[in-house]
Image (cartoon, helix red, strand yellow):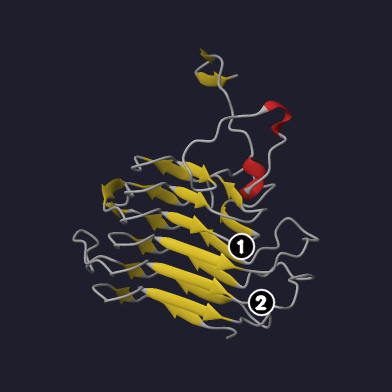
Amino acid sequence: ATGVLVEANLISSNQGTGVGIDGNISYDGELRIQHNVIGSDVTQQVPLANLFDGINIRLDISTPLLGTSTPLVRVFDNTVAGNEGHGISVSGGAPSPRLDSRMTNVQIIQNRIGCTIADNSTVVPMGNGKAGVYLEGDHNLVGNFFGDETEPFRNANIIAHNSGTGIVVASGNRHDLRGNLIFSNGLLGIDLNNDGATENDDEDADDGPNGLTNFPFVSTAFLANGELFLR
């Protein structure tokens, strides 16, 4: 598949996955899934669950993804809420080294996952039955690009009220998880290795999904000149 657009659909109450992508995707043009409502009614106030995942992407790629900053799949500005399985599940993808930090297999940006937005501001809980985002494979982006610190929430996903973890990294490396709003999920906000909280280790020497990166430890918090500082 190449240059495919799945846009502005209401995809709910199906006896399977809402949107499924399975197979080889060429590099001639990205596949875009955008502006869809997946798992609720048209008002986005009543859940109408798809039986499995809201979006399930299974990549089978033999050619290394080098020399292009265009993702294979872009998942943009969807409401994915109320589904029985994961909100968005991604597996497969080229494990080759990247020449550029913006090179990704799948980009997941500016979505509402596990909730809807009412009156352009109010978060309405409508959790998916498992994780908000479930990642296997390598080199996927959830949220903001590296280097966009001046607008840290520009591409934020709201990942909230899911029954499981907000984001699961079950396998692979170089998944970028940046600038998302993750809250009120049933388990952890982010789970590396899909096995619950992993204790920090000296020098962060252990290995696993995303290198089992140690979580930050906040020792102090204080207000100064109206700003909150964490150390």
68 lies left or right of 48? right
* Residue that sits furthest to the bottom in the current view: 1
User: Quarter holding the C terminus?
Assistant: top right
Name the residue at 39% across, 60% down.
87
Return the residue nearer the eye: 149 or 209.
209
Secondary structure state at the residue bearing disc 1: loop
Whether residue 199 is visible to the viewer of this picture, yes or no, is: yes
Residue 81 locus on image (x, y percent): 31, 59
For badge 1, the amino acid type reads Gly
Q: Which residue is mark 2?
A: 61
Secondary structure state at the residue bearing disc 2: loop
**57 in relation to 27, above or below:** above
Name the residue at 32% across, 75% down.
16
For badge 2, the amino acid type reads Ile
Q: Earlier in the sequence, mark 1 or mark 2?
A: 2
Q: Which residue is mark 1?
A: 137
Name the residue at 64% across, 80% down.
29
Residue 178 locus on image (x, y percent): 58, 46
